[in-house]
Image: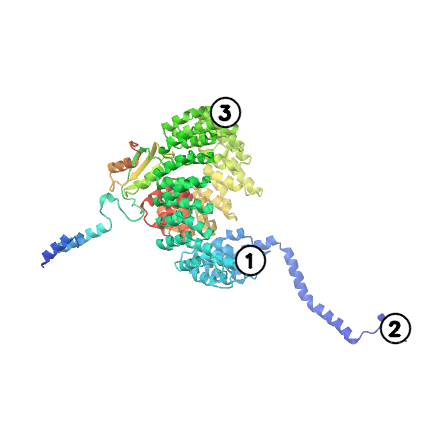
Amino acid sequence: MTIEIPRSESPRPPRARGRWWGLAFALLAAVPALHVATASGYEEQAESAWEARRRILAAVPKDPTILINVTQREMPSSPDLLQLGKRSTAALSRCLSDNVDAGLRRTCAQMLGAIGDRAALPTLQAALEDWDATVRDAAAAALARLGDPSSVDALAKALTRADEEPWVQASIVRSLGSISSPKAVPILRAELRRKPDGKRPDLRMDAFYAVWRSRHLLARATLEADLADLLRGSDDSLVLAATEAAAEVRSARLAPPLTALVDHRNAEIRNKAVYALGRIGDRAATRTLLAQVPKVRESRLLNNISFALERLDPEAFRPAIASLLKHKQAIIRLNAAFVIGDSRRVEGRPLLQGALEDPNDYVRTSAIVALGKLEGEESVKALERFTQDQNPSIREEAIYAAYEASGRKATGAIHDQLFLSNRAAVRLRAAHVLAAAGDPRVGDFLLACVESGSCAAGALAGYFVKLQRTDVGERMLLAWARGRDDLAPLVGLLKPAGAVPLAAGSVDAAFATGGEQRAPVAIRLLADLGDRSVAARLAPRATASELWLRAVVGTTLVRLGHGGAEAQLVADLDLLPQEWLPRYSGLLAGVAEPDARARLTPALAERSKKGEAPLALAASRVLLEWDPEAHFPRMFDALATGTVQERELAEDYLAQAEDARVTFLLRRALSRETRPYARDRLRLVLDRRG
Amino acid sequence: MSAARRERATHRAGIGGGPRALCRRMPKPLVAACLVASAAVACGGAGPAGARGSGWDVPVPASEPREELAIRVTLPPGADCEERFDLALYEHRGVDLVTWDEAEGCRGRTARIRFLPRRITRAALLERARQLAAPGGMEPLP
């Protein structure tokens, strides 16, 4: 028999009792830690993520260590950090080297690249050894943007690591191509020549573009030999890239390998090869191109062949194109007529006159448009009978073509037959052509068109200004006040009565209601209106924390003659991320007032001569827009003799310059230029300007 | 062979000529001036009407006088007629800047040619423009 002892009454063994005491002591010991944890949790809840970001952002310029321990939650946004410009370099560098979060390190590397401060070079170079591949990739890309030759050794070493990810290696190769170092070129050319063997990734495309960007460091003959080898290769991507490059290099040495590509299976390569041959202008290619003409089956290739032949051998071109005008397929005849028109040679007129008798309406229309491009009385006479054609499309094109061929003189038919038509699309097109000719009869129509949003105001601004009608300005002001921000530049040009108080009130209202996104438009309008009395009212906004708002206010104050505003503009320019310099310099370039330019010029001229390339060229860009002749030499020097970064920036700035004199200066430079790479770039810029 | 005979032989053979050889035959006081002249030639300071220059565009000092010529011109037709005219005209370093009206096309265009009268005369410039225009397609404007 067994006796059951109730559990509640069973005595606890001494060891079990001791265990409970142990647990109690452990709990007591944990109290301070729990308190800290609870308190810190309480603090995190007390400080919102937004507040934490604000606190950290404020500390970034002063405390280089502030980003070491931040989490994703606390990290200020990239635009906020970029607004600090070079003042955030030190903190971002420490973030890249010391933060344990790979995602944050990557972000910091990206921002260091965008800022472009050379002080970050050692940290970025060291980050090529980061444990995380995405960080190494971001570091390589950032080093590319800084374009400093001191990075070559670190990049070259990173490229040789057998355990590196292929996409990081590609990034490193691209970076080597952007730093303008003669030491990098052999590495890149070796990579370009390396045949894929399955062991190493195929980096040839990246190597090609890297070599291409550094091409000014190569002897011309070496570049041509490399391109010729690639043109004879079997990799379509590389062949295509080399074909595009050959069109820029325009060496007769490349004509034979290009000629072999004109019947390549890849249509893109065929077209680019024909185009390149046309640019090179080697007559040896004529026979091959002529042989292609009867076989051609696509309009693009036909056009490329025709343009190439027209350059290589106009005498051989005309019989070939004449035969195409008799081709059995209408689409070929249509394209042949188009090509003759675009060549703009009057020798093509008899061919087009023949095509006017084509049974196909589309071919006839193409011939009519083409004849319009061959100016002269003969073209006008040939087109006359079609201006009364029964087919409205033919009639319309004939009227425009006759107008073009007459040197844009007689607008009567455009007005009477097209603008007074009851077809909306026909009227609209006619109205724009008449406006370009300065015809006041279409003013009301176009005004209503702009008000309804069907016509773009920018294209018609010059016309409306020439009209000199007060009601145009008044109606544009009304539309702007109703929310049409796109009309602000036109209102600024027309300067209607009442615009200044309305714009100034609009600025105040925008700030008062937190709708600051509309403020810049109204502030710029105040600058365009040029009433200096509003400067004092705007001045308090010059210290806005948002950089772009500050920049708009600053440029407006400078334009309105408010003293001291230029100092803040230049101070911001000095610290700006290099990525933002093109936009910022564009804003400064818009300063039109001579006295404002005079006040900004000394500081910009100083920066254009020394300092880091992005800043120097941004300053030069502003000066180029203000006085192209005086400041063209600086930009031209960067284009012809600079680093990769300088050449590319100068190319962009010269291509975008608004003043037509830049085109004339580029032509003068091209005419006298004997350095091959400088000639190439000048040609490129002129082509981009169109 | 005497020095004089050697010099004549050298002259007949067509070697050793030029300013330096000439300097060697000159009295010493003239040598310095001769060297300066040689340097000037080497640097392109002389030459036909300043047509040649360095291998690229270089700014002309603001102090050098400029004049302007306005012309109405019809250009040989072509998609790039205006640019072709400019590129050919700029080959002469006496042409400082060619600016065009806003019109398009090749007929009846107006161009203003700023030039350096120390390097090219107005008459020579007009003749050059006439050669580059379509036949009978150039007239100077007042």
Question: Which is closer to the viewer, label 1 or label 3?
Answer: 3
Residue B92 is left or right of residue A544, and the answer is: left
Question: Which is closer to the viewer, label 2 or label 3?
Answer: 3
Residue placed most toward the observer, A389 or A23: A389
Residue labelled with disc 3: A421
Residue A75 drawn above or below residue B77 = below
**Given the image, on which type of amino acid does mark 2 rest?**
Glu
Could you tell me how far apart the alpha carbons at marks 1 and 2 are, in whole angstroms?
A: 66 Å
Q: Residues within 10 Å of mark 3 (few under 14, many from 20)?
A: some
Residue labelled with disc 1: A104
User: Mark 2 near mark 3, Cβ–Cβ under 8 Å?
Assistant: no
Q: In which quadrant will I find the C terminus of chain A?
A: top left
At x 68%, y 64%, the residue is A34
Residue labelled with disc 2: A4
Q: How many marks?
A: 3
**Mark 1 vs 3, N-terminal side:** 1
Residue B38 drawn above or below residue A296 = below
Q: Residues within 10 Å of mark 1 (few under 14, many from 20)?
A: many
Residue placed most toward the observer, A615 or A260: A260
Is residue A81 visible to the viewer in this orientation of the structure?
yes
The chain that hosts pointer 3 is: A
Element on which disc 2 rests: loop
At x 89%, y 74%, the residue is A3
Could you tell me how far apart the alpha carbons at marks 2 and 3 are, in whole angstroms?
A: 114 Å
**Given the image, on which type of amino acid does mark 1 rest?**
Leu
Element on which disc 1 rests: helix
Residue placed most toward the observer, A83 or B87: B87
Across and down, in percent, residue A671 comes to 32, 44
